[in-house]
Amino acid sequence: MSNEVNPKKYSVPLTEGPNRAAARSYLRGVGFSKEDLHKPIIGIANTWTEIGPCNFHLRIVAEAVKKGIRDAGGTPMEFNTVTISDGITMGTQGMKASLISREVIADSIELVARGNLFDGLVCIAGCDKNMPAAIMALVRLDIPSLMLYGGSIAPGHVHVGADGNPAADQSKDDGKLIDITIQNVFEAIGSHAAGKINDAQLEAVEAAACPGAGACGGQFTANTMAMAAEFLGISPIGLTGVPAMSPEKTAASREAGRIVMEMARRDLRPSRLITRDSLENAIVAVAASGGSTNAVLHLIAIANEAGLHLTVDDFDIISRKTPLLCDLKPGGNYVAKDYQDAGGSRLLAKLLLEAGLLHPDTLTVNSKTISEEAAEAVETPGQPVIHHLDNAIKATGGLVILKGNLAPEGCVIKVAGHERLNHTGPARVFENEETCMEAVESGKIKPNDVLVIRYEGPRGGPGMREMLGVTAAVVGIPELAHTVALLTDGRFSGATRGLMAGHVAPEAALKGPIAAVRDGDTITFDIPNRKLTVEISDEEIANRLKDWKAPEPRFKRGVFAKYANSVSSAAHGAVTT
């Protein structure tokens, strides 16, 4: 075709000519043939690990991708990078490593790709931080490339009694059989601590929630970022949503290999895909799906890599005009597999285009526009997951940004899944996640309290721990679930049902106003007016901060210290410089 280029243009200096015989000899030593080395070389960045289900199956995915590349005339070369499981590390000091890993993963992929002069790249990712990290690396490299999601886990199943609690003996086929996700385990921990369920009931939920490989099944961070990547154009729409263990996964992964070869022939690079318009499309999808608040952090970081200006205020502007259309956990009733079966992202794009909410001409890895992809949508008749515009779940999207004397750079809060729009209550201040969790589990939290957890931000943590354990434990205690609010300079991500929880910037470790809050101060969340305030004067805040001293760094050497010394505010994506 006239618009094709030499798909091997980047790797020629590595493999071609007599003076590259030594390099070719090394590569032939690991099994590549003479013919292989004269074909376009496509890197495969694999985030495989056997520590947790999200990435456990990615070697299988990689083999299928490589088959697709070979069939299309290329030579795949696979390499690994690190990854951290948010869910496993949650509630421990290990969770500090999660956000830090985003930067390490992006750096490592960039390093290997630049060092080996790949003609193209497929990043296979399956978890909260390795997906945005992969996209960040692709933007930096700007070679023909895409991100392929490993896919969502299947839902677990548990029998529950009339009281909604799990049956202690799951071997008996009595009670109602319901779908569950890992969220139910976190909530069960809270119920167990409150004496609402016993050890056997907790064990029943623990044993059932994760039935195999794949990322967390609700519209948590992994599925949110996978969907966002489809609307960004950097992941193949439709293929991305195929669940991890679906019989269709192998064919979908082979197709991704074919697509990256076609991108190499067209020299279709991320700089043509990730634009201001495609970033706005991704935000629309997040808002319409009730996606994780972590999307704010990650999309701002991706925009930063692309040299594009994106702020927290953009999310609020877009969410205000975007209806909530997807009935997905944690705020709704269904999981990622149900979304894919209903029609997936092509169907959602079709509905959002009909509403005039998407930029229709943004490109995707298939060399099609988002509107051309949406035209291929196939909706399952009667599906209850993706609502049409005339039956929107809410008139506005799932994210809001609050400002005020507690959040001069913004507070991100998720409103999908609950109706509370205002909360005023006394602050209960905790200097870390552990002391707050202890207070929740020991019954020291009262209705109307505002739990303030600080020094957990990007620099202060370091690493901005996500605290799903705390939020889920609160939800697991019925008298607290709809009566308290939470505030942090770390992350809650919105993976909760019916809970008002937000994260603020600047953080306490940067002398943000949250550092001035004291027990008993009255804090007000006012979502309609986009306000978050502590009811003390600016003068009093300034007086309290006069005596503030930066806490001793928790890490003085190594990767955590390097990160803390170079990371930006969460409002700017928590990127390192």
Image (spheres, rainbow, N blue to C red):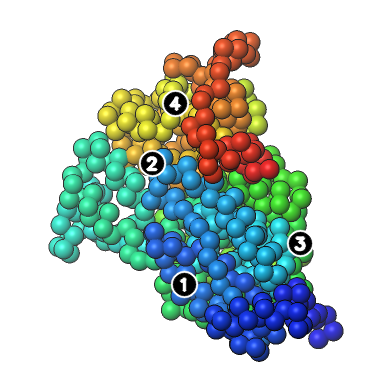
Q: CA distance from mark 3 to mark 1?
A: 28 Å
Mark 2 vs 4, N-terminal side = 2
Q: Is residue 295 left or right of residue 330?
A: right
User: Quarter holding the N terminus?
Assistant: bottom right
On the image, the x and y values in percent for residue 546 come to: 60, 12
- For the residue marked with disc 4, what is the amino acid? Glu
Q: CA distance from mark 2 to mark 4?
A: 15 Å
Mark 2 near mark 4, Cβ–Cβ under 8 Å?
no
Q: How many marks?
A: 4
In the rendered image, which residue does mark 1 sit on? 59
Mark 2 near mark 1, Cβ–Cβ under 8 Å?
no
- For the residue marked with disc 2, what is the amino acid? Thr
Q: CA distance from mark 3 to mark 2?
A: 38 Å
User: Quarter holding the C terminus?
Assistant: top right
User: Element at badge 2?
Assistant: loop
Vertical position of residue 31 compared to residue 333: above or below: below
Q: CA distance from mark 2 to mark 1?
A: 28 Å
Q: Residues within 10 Å of mark 3 (few under 14, many from 20)?
A: some
In the rendered image, which residue does mark 3 sit on? 271
Q: Residues within 10 Å of mark 4 (few under 14, many from 20)?
A: some
Mark 3 near mark 2, Cβ–Cβ under 8 Å?
no
In the rendered image, which residue does mark 4 sit on? 431
In the rendered image, which residue does mark 2 sit on? 92
On the image, the x and y values in percent for residue 28 come to: 59, 83
- For the residue marked with disc 3, what is the amino acid? Ser
